[in-house]
Image (cartoon, helix red, strand yellow):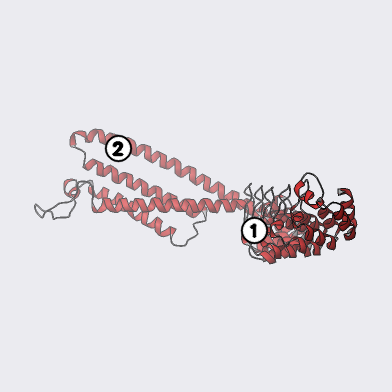
Amino acid sequence: MEQKLNEAAIVGNVASLHEILKEDGLILDRFVLSGSNAIISPLHVAASRGHTQFVKELLDLNLDLAEVVDSRRRSALHLASAKGHVDIVKVLSANPEMCVARDLDGKNPLHVAAMKGQVEILKELVRASPQAARAKVDTGETILHLCVKHKQLQTLEILVNAIKCQELLNAKDGNGNTVLHLAVSDKQFSIIKILLEGNLVDVNATNANENTALDIFVESKIENEDIGNILHKFGAKIGKDIVKGEWLMKKRDALMVVASLIATMAFQAGVSPAGGVWQDDSNGHRAGETVMAYNYPDSFPYFLRANTIGFVASLSTILLLISGLPFRKRAFMWMLVVIMWLTITSMAFTYAFSITVVTPKKDRESLSSTIFVAVIVWCSVMAILLLVHTGNLIATMLKEQRIKYITTKRIFTCGSC
């Protein structure tokens, strides 16, 4: 009997449907109860063949047929969407839950319509269930990724204009690629243009390999001048520049914290130095003046200079960081780091003078030896760090200039290749 019903569905014979139901009134219920046991329901058959009236008749008789799925978990709406039967899709999409139903690959009917380029189906399903467009398939791809992979320009344009969702446009697949990454890799200039001109796509988004769309363009040796030009027009950068920018921001934040801390320490040491201050006015001193200046007149000026250098250098670092100067330049950051080295060194000398003041005379000889060794080690470490960082700075700047030269030459000469 099931065979007769499917034959009626193939040709869309409504009269045969009613005759079969007279003989077996429970036949449709059995299809519903069978679930996904590899049985193709008559609704699947009629929907794929485009028999609108037959579909309506089946749903009038048993509305639950719309939820029946085949062995690949495809509903009748999946099949109708793939075939482009608009009227049937309108009928089946009346149940919003079926618009988001997923097959074995995680695709809902909207995904299928986008892959097949069924524009009218796409419009209808977006109206019926906008949230279906935001769902991802099992591989992590969005509906926009599928449009690009299947070269469906028109469906992509409709979705971009209809949804205008920045989160969806910048969503990444399992490999971290955005829609723009795929479009550049596949040399689809028209799609790239649509994506960028909408001003919602992050042109410098990086994938799992830290590559931007411009990296893919350069590394793939794509001979398309238009793609290179439009990427540069919208501010595309190579991935290393993005990573460098993030590194510099972290370095800036770290310098700000350290400079603020040292400035606080230096201020406190200046107004309340080791040994304290006099509490009265007598014997040539006044209340509030530092004891160190009277008891250690030779060491106090050195203490004062070291502490002042550390304090002023810290404030200078803070001022430079908040001044709006190009701290993203490595040379500028190198200069700030050197200033901080000077600041830390000054604070080390401040500590040395302070600890000498509060140490009893009987222990000062051993303390002097310890300080002497510490100063030698400290100066050696500073010298090594200065040489290493200076060498790295020069090497990095030369490498970056070479990369930029090669990249620019590659982009603006590819049109004549």
Q: Is residue 117 visible?
A: no
* Residue 79 in picture, x, y percent from top left: 80, 55
Instruction: Residue 165 in the image: state x and y as whole percent.
Output: 63, 62
Q: Are marks 2 and 1 in contact (CB under 8 Å)?
A: no
The residue that appears at 26% across and 35% down in the rendered structure is 367
| Picture residue at 26% right of the left edge, 52% below the top | 270
The residue nearer to you, when weighing 175 against 353, is 175
User: Residue 168 bears which disc, if any?
Assistant: 1
Q: Which picture quadrant has residue 17?
A: bottom right
Q: Which residue is mark 2?
A: 371
Provide the secondary structure element on which disc 2 rests. helix
Query: Residue 386: horizontal and vertical position, in percent?
Result: 45, 44
Q: Nearer the viewer, residue 303 or 61?
A: 61
**Spatial separation of the CA atoms under disc 2 and disc 1:** 62 Å
Q: Residue furthest left?
A: 283
Neighbour class for label 1 at 10 Å: few (<14), some, many (≥20)? many
Q: Position of residue 58 (x, y in %)?
A: 81, 58
Mark 1 secondary-structure assignment? helix
In-image side of 334 versus 225 (left or right)? left
Q: Name the kind of residue labelled 1 in the image.
A: Leu
Q: Is residue 236 above or below residue 173?
A: below
Q: Label 2 is placed on what type of residue?
A: Ile
For the image, the number of numbered tags is 2
- Circle 2: is it few (<14), some (14-19), or many (20+) Cα within 10 Å? some
First along the sequence among labels 2 and 1: 1
Is residue 105 shown to the viewer in this render?
yes
Q: Is the C terminus in the top left, top right, bottom left or bottom right quadrant?
A: bottom right
Residue 8, numbered label: none
